[in-house]
Image (cartoon, helix red, strand yellow):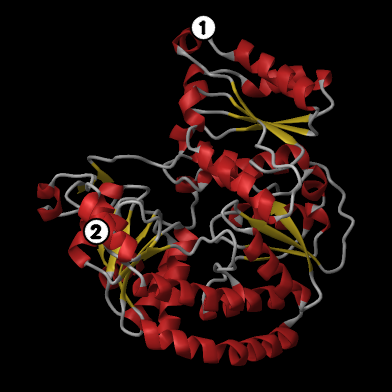
Amino acid sequence: MPRTYSGIREQREYTDTYLDLAGSSLQIEQDFKKKCIKNADRTFSQSYQCQELNSISALLSVNDAVLIAHAPQGCVGCITMGADMYRVAQIHRGAEKITSPKILITNLDQSDVIMGGEGKLRESIRLASERYKPKLIFVFTSCASGIIGDDVDAIVREAQPDTEALIVPVHCDGFRSKICASGYDAAFIAISKFVLKGAVPKKEKGLINLFAPMTVSFADQLEIEKLLRRIGLKSNFLPFFSDYDKVLNIPNAEASTSICKVFADEFMKDIEHDFGIPYAHTVMPVGIRNTDKWYRAIAEITGKGDEVEEIIATEHARIQPELDKIKLKLQGKSVFICGGTGRSFAAATLIDDFGMKLLGIETPVYDLDAQDDIAFLNDIHGDYLIDVANMLPFEQVNIVNKLKPDVFIGVPSWSSRFGIPTTHILDPKRPTMGYDGIVWLGNKIAAQIENPGFNKKLSKYARLPYRESWYDEDPFKFIKEVI
């Protein structure tokens, strides 16, 4: 029987998923166990990261591909950040010539909403093929093209004979799902359906599919690949900075894993079903506990358990003296964390390595995977605040102002204006994952706390984004149960 998954995470049968939720971590853990959490919604929201953005970012740096967004111009506005990361990553990889990602947009307007935008899409496919001579052309749908009802698949079939590139439609209309990770699923479903369909695997012993989002730096890639090499494994790192040949090599792998919990979890189920490739769905390898757990999961499906245990023992002994020094600086410091589903929980585990105290955590989704992490974090941190929110800074600044942590870990744009030391577990130059990443991150957090001068001055001169009255309000006043 073929495995059928719609690509919409709200429609998965095996787990409850919550997007609008806040409160005590201990209470939420218990309510989730008892299935007592009631569905809710926010009566006011500033912004949401949509699934189209994640579909595009997942495939942005496939080197021999062109991306076409069948959308209004504003739909690719956030891709400027991804384009910058792509250019910086080329520098770190030693590229002699720095290029931008190849993205075309059909620029749907009011006339197209009435008359249809199929003509613009046909022209964009022609231009992409003639201008860039790619091996792949990814066509991304949007809310606008979905509402119009343009038959993207039919246009792709019509255009395919006129180009040597394989044209791949990616159905990621933003209104289909409020869970932005559905965009990753849409991208991988397209790869399964149009690129890997009918593939006959030629198994390569020791080859591991290593799926990673574009936020994973080159330093982290090297760190993770080093861990795999130490147990005789070779990584097929994708889709970030991959190419058509690497994508075609997916079915030949011995096993698969992902660096992010929500990035390729559904896709790994697909390729296990289609090609018999076992996979390790585990945590992001940040911090001692998570790195150990990630490494052991790979070892279990590749028969490398004894080797990995020896390496783990060696690595613990190697970094422990450095961790002891860092802990002297960070012991007892309080933290608020904001990040994606994988990174936020990984950071909350990491700070326990330094004896720090978790005050609160903001994450986009609460589901069964999150429940496992929260149960572990509750054991080590006790009770703390959980805010399940997808890019809602108005809640975040209210919470941070009330909790007043010693350090904020996450995107620091607004929290830094309170004068609070801020840092992030994203770093383009140095590892944040694996055992060396633990030491680097600890020193980075300590350096921010010891040198808060910039943020202190910023708090004196930079205007906060909301009226003072908002900081006295309940940050969760807009979360209402759905009756």
Asked if one can make out residue 444 in the rendered structure from this viewpoint, the answer is yes
Q: Is residue 50 above or below residue 104?
A: below
In which quadrant will I find the C terminus? top left
Image coordinates of residue 256 in percent, x first then y, are 71, 62
- Name the residue type under label 1: Met
Q: Which mark is residue 357?
A: none
Nearest the eye: 265 or 249:
249
Mark 2 touches mark 1? (CB < 8 Å):
no
User: What residue lies at 71% left-to-right and 43% top-to-bottom?
Assistant: 62
Instruction: Determine the secondary structure under disc 1.
Output: helix
Q: Which mark is residue 418?
A: 2
Left or right placement of residue 468 versus residue 244 in this view:
left
User: What residue lies at 60% left-to-right and 53% top-to-bottom?
Assistant: 213
Q: Residues within 10 Å of mark 2 (few under 14, many from 20)?
A: many
Instruction: Determine the secondary structure under disc 2.
Output: helix
Q: Quadrant of residue 261?
A: bottom right
Nearest to the eye among marks 2 and 1: give it. Answer: 2
Q: Which mark is residue 115?
A: 1
Left or right placement of residue 204 versus residue 355 in this view:
right
Residue situated furthest right in the rendering = 202
Left or right placement of residue 327 versus residue 429 in this view:
left
User: What residue lies at 70% left-to-right and 47% top-to-bottom?
Assistant: 2
